[in-house]
Amino acid sequence: MMSNKKRLATFVAAIVLMFSAMTLSSPATHAVGCYGDWCSGRDADATGCSADAVTTQVYNNKEFSLQVRWSPTCKTNWARIVMYSPGWIKCTSNGYLKAVQDTGYTQQIFFDTVCAAVSTVHYTPMIYSPVHRVRAVFVNQNNFTYSTPWS
C-alpha cells in the first residue's frame, strides 16, 4: 500500500505537471499601447504595434525598399523605407515619407540626409485602416516620387 506521504507527493506532482503543460501550450501575446483609431499618429515601435507587423506592399530599387506595413493587432498601417548602404560611407537621399490612405488622409515625416556605412530605416506614424487601402510614398530631394501599389 502507498503511504499518505507518497499519495500526496504523487498528487502534487500531477498538479504541477498539469499546470506547466497548460502554461507551455498558451499562445504568446504581446501588450500594445493602443488599438484602432487611438493609434493614428502614433509610433508603431513605441506602442508595440510593430511586433506583429507584416509587409503588405513593397517597391524596391537599388537605393531603397519602400514598404507598407500592417499590424493585425492594432489594425493600423504605416510607411517604412529602408535606405540601403553599399558597405562604405554613403549619403542617402533626404525627403518626405508618407502613408497615404485612399480617403486622402496622410501621415508623413521628413528625414534629413544620413551619411553612414549601414542601412537606415525611417517610418511614418500609423494610420487606422481596417477597411481603407494605404500606400507608401517617398518624395526625394530632387522631387522624384516613388510609391507602392495600394495595400
Image: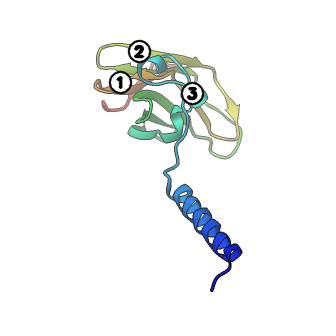
In the rendered structure, which disc, 1 or 2, sits on the residue that comes first in sequence? Answer: 2
Question: What kind of residue is marked 3?
Answer: Thr
Question: What kind of residue is marked 1?
Answer: Ser
- Circle 1 or circle 3, nearest the eye: 3
Which mark, residue 106?
Answer: 2
**SS category of the residue bearing label 2:** strand
Residue 20 in percent (x, y) is at: 59, 60
Residue 138 in percent (x, y) is at: 46, 24
Residue 44 in percent (x, y) is at: 54, 28
The image quadrant that residue 120 belongs to is top right
Left of 96 or right of it: where is 105? left
Residue at screen point 70% across, 35% down? 116
Which mark, residue 47?
Answer: 3
Q: Label 3 crowding class (10 Å Cα cut-off): few <14, some 14-19, many 20+?
A: some
In the rendered structure, which disc, 1 or 3, sits on the residue that comes first in sequence? Answer: 3
Residue at screen point 54% across, 36% down? 82
Pointer 1: what residue?
129
Q: Label 1 crowding class (10 Å Cα cut-off): few <14, some 14-19, many 20+?
A: many
Residue 35, compared with residue 5, is above or below; it is above
In the rendered structure, which disc, 3 or 2, sits on the residue that comes first in sequence? Answer: 3
Question: What kind of residue is marked 2?
Answer: Thr
Q: How many tags in the picture?
A: 3
**SS category of the residue bearing label 3:** helix
Quadrant of the frame with the C terminus: top left
Q: CA distance from mark 3 to mark 2?
A: 19 Å
Left of 47 or right of it: where is 136? left
Residue 129, compared with residue 3, is above or below; it is above
